């Protein structure tokens, strides 16, 4: 890594391959920018073909021995890595804040810790990769869950540590190796995960991190030695990666974008619904795939809900992400800020009202950062661009509804199907509506909580497969069936 002037001690080279940091300055430079100030804090280099080759080859070497280990031994390494991450949480959270701009108040509790919990959770399950046995008269058969081999992980930029760990933990627990390519926007955090896994006792090559833009991701998905691709990213990228993987019949997990509905019925606890809507739209400056950005509010409570939501949103502490009192930081990139501003302008043109927010923040020291205040739009209708396209920023759209059947139909009228939220005190309605919503994850009277024991992922265009929970182990293994003949073999002639 060149030009690194801060944080000096937090990253030492562009890639982590075969158990050590490696550099190859022949790769195109990628500037790492601290979003709060716009400063370049480091420069990494894209992986050259030689780095990609080294990463895949060393992962393949490591994988066979790792898969042959007893599951308890694999699990011990993952759990040790989790302990190291927990112990180094503050340092890793500061790095996450430099990488993404997310406030330390969030990164201290939601990023390295969530990554560590994934390693802890799947470390605990590593000894429990079991098959089934079945009888057919005197004969019988049994199944074994076999690791796939070398898997590729490709990450988005909003949760760089969490995404690396959510992919690595189930892959490694089940006996695979992984080559991980972080987003080019946030390259630093995954390197630390690789370093910590080695410190915890993982063999060199088991988890390699290489940098690069889409072409490096494509080089991984196209390599015949890669057995599976797990992508977190946008729907258009998902289509490309899925098509590339399909050409060689590879396994995939696709964690893609969303435009999730958030339903507030007239009987909801309004303060809880407002809290849920804030979490569902403004956490991480709105850069969360599962955000409930279409907030459908029943006509009877619409005005009261909007008034409370506006008042509470205006109390958000916006500013220095390194100050633990700060609730709300900058967008992660200039490009994402531009997208948000374009969406706000289009929403205004199409007739929505901005009741608060959507303004650039001019703060001494932060003038060159990517700041925009959390925005609430009312008068949004289903046809408006802001109600149809993923914004991936702090833009909450309020839409009015009157009937349950009407709001369910409107909630489902999207190509996305990542998540949904239902706020009501009526138990029957909550479950009836949840059963009709076309989404991979639905929260009732809560939003965006993703404990490791719960499957998470999207339906429709939002993805294929699930992360977390026992289910993720299935996505990193394949079933091998062994038929055992116990009697004489009959043949026609
Ligand atoms: P993106 O699709 O632009 O990039 C994602 C990753 O794919 C990056 O690492 C990128 O370099 C890589 N990539 C791009 N083209 C590629 C190609 N042809 N082959 C292989 N890899 C390629 O997404 P982003 O802007 O980094 O992230 C934002 C998007 O991610 C949003 O749509 C958001 O909803 C989604 N997301 C989804 C989840 C989830 O769990 N469902 C979580 C976070 C973000």
Image (cartoon, rainbow, N blue to C red):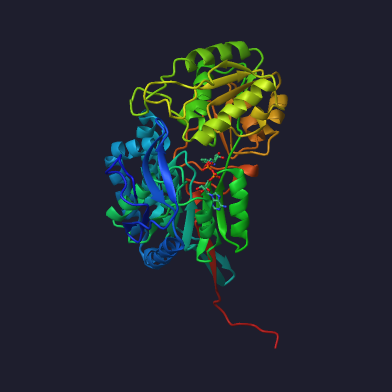
Can residue 170 be seen in the rendering of this structure? Answer: no
| View extreme (bottom): residue | 493
**220 or 215: which is nearer to us?**
215
Q: Nearer the viewer, residue 260 or 139?
A: 260
Which quadrant of the rendered structure holds the C terminus?
A: bottom right
Between residues 464 and 431, which one lies in front from this camera angle?
Answer: 464
Taking the image as shown, residue 278 lies to the left or right of residue 26, namely: right
Indicate the position of residue 374 as horizontal and vertical percent values: 51, 22
> Taking 369 as reference, is 380 left or right?
right
Q: Residue at x 34, y 39 (%)?
A: 95
Specify the quadrant of the image occupied by residue 159: top left
| Location of residue 164 in the rendering, given as x and y in whole percent from the top left corner | 43, 47
**Residue at 38% from the left image edge and 46% from the top image edge:** 43
> Image point 33% across, 36% down: which residue?
94
Residue 282 against residue 303 in the figure, above or below: below
161 w.r.t. 247: above or below: above
Which picture quadrant has residue 134? Answer: bottom right
């Amino acid at each position: 890594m060149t030009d690194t002037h801060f944080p000096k001690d937090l990253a030492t080279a562009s890639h982590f391959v075969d158990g050590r940091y490696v550099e190859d300055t022949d790769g195109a430079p990628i500037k790492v920018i601290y979003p709060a100030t716009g400063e370049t804090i480091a420069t990494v280099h894209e992986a050259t073909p030689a780095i990609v080759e080294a990463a895949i080859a060393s992962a393949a070497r490591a994988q066979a021995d790792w898969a042959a280990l007893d599951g308890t031994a694999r699990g011990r390494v993952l759990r040790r890595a989790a302990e190291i991450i927990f112990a180094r949480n503050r340092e890793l959270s500061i790095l996450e804040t430099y990488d993404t701009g997310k406030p330390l108040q969030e990164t201290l509790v939601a990023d390295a810790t969530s990554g560590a919990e994934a390693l802890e959770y799947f470390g605990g399950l590593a000894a429990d990769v079991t098959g089934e046995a079945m009888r057919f008269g005197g004969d019988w058969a049994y199944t074994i869950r076999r690791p796939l081999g070398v898997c590729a992980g490709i990450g988005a930029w909003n949760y760089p540590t969490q995404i690396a760990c959510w992919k690595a933990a189930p892959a490694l627990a089940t006996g695979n190796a992984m080559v991980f390519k972080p987003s080019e926007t946030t390259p630093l955090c995954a390197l630390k995960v690789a370093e910590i896994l080695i410190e915890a006792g993982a063999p060199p090559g088991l988890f390699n991190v290489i940098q690069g833009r889409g072409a490096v991701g494509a080089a991984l998905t196209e390599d015949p030695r890669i057995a599976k691709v797990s992508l977190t990213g946008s729907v258009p990228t998902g289509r490309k990666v899925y098509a590339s993987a399909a050409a060689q019949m590879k396994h995939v997990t696709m964690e893609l974008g969303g435009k999730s509905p958030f339903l507030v019925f007239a009987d909801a606890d309004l303060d809880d619904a407002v809290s849920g809507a804030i979490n569902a739209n403004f956490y991480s400056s709105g850069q969360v795939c599962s955000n409930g950005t279409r907030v459908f509010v029943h006509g009877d409570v619409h005005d009261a809900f909007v008034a409370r939501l506006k008042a509470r949103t205006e109390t958000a502490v916006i500013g220095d992400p390194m100050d633990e009192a700060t609730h709300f930081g900058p967008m992660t990139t200039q490009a994402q800020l531009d997208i948000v501003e374009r969406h706000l302008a289009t929403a205004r043109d199409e007739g929505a009202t901005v009741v608060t927010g959507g303004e650039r923040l001019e703060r001494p020291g932060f003038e060159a950062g990517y700041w925009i205040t959390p925005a609430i739009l009312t008068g949004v209708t289903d046809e408006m661009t802001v109600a149809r396209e993923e914004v991936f920023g702090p833009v909450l759209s309020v839409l009015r509804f009157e009937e349950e059947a009407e709001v369910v139909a409107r909630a489902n009228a999207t190509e996305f199907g990542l998540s949904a939220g239902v706020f009501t005190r009526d138990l029957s309605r909550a479950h009836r509506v949840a059963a009709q919503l076309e989404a991979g994850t639905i929260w009732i009277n809560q939003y965006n909580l993703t404990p490791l024991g719960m499957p998470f992922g999207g339906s429709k265009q939002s993805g294929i497969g699930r992360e977390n929970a026992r289910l993720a182990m299935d996505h990193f293994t394949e079933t091998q069936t062994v038929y055992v003949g116990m009697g004489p073999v009959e043949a026609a002639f």
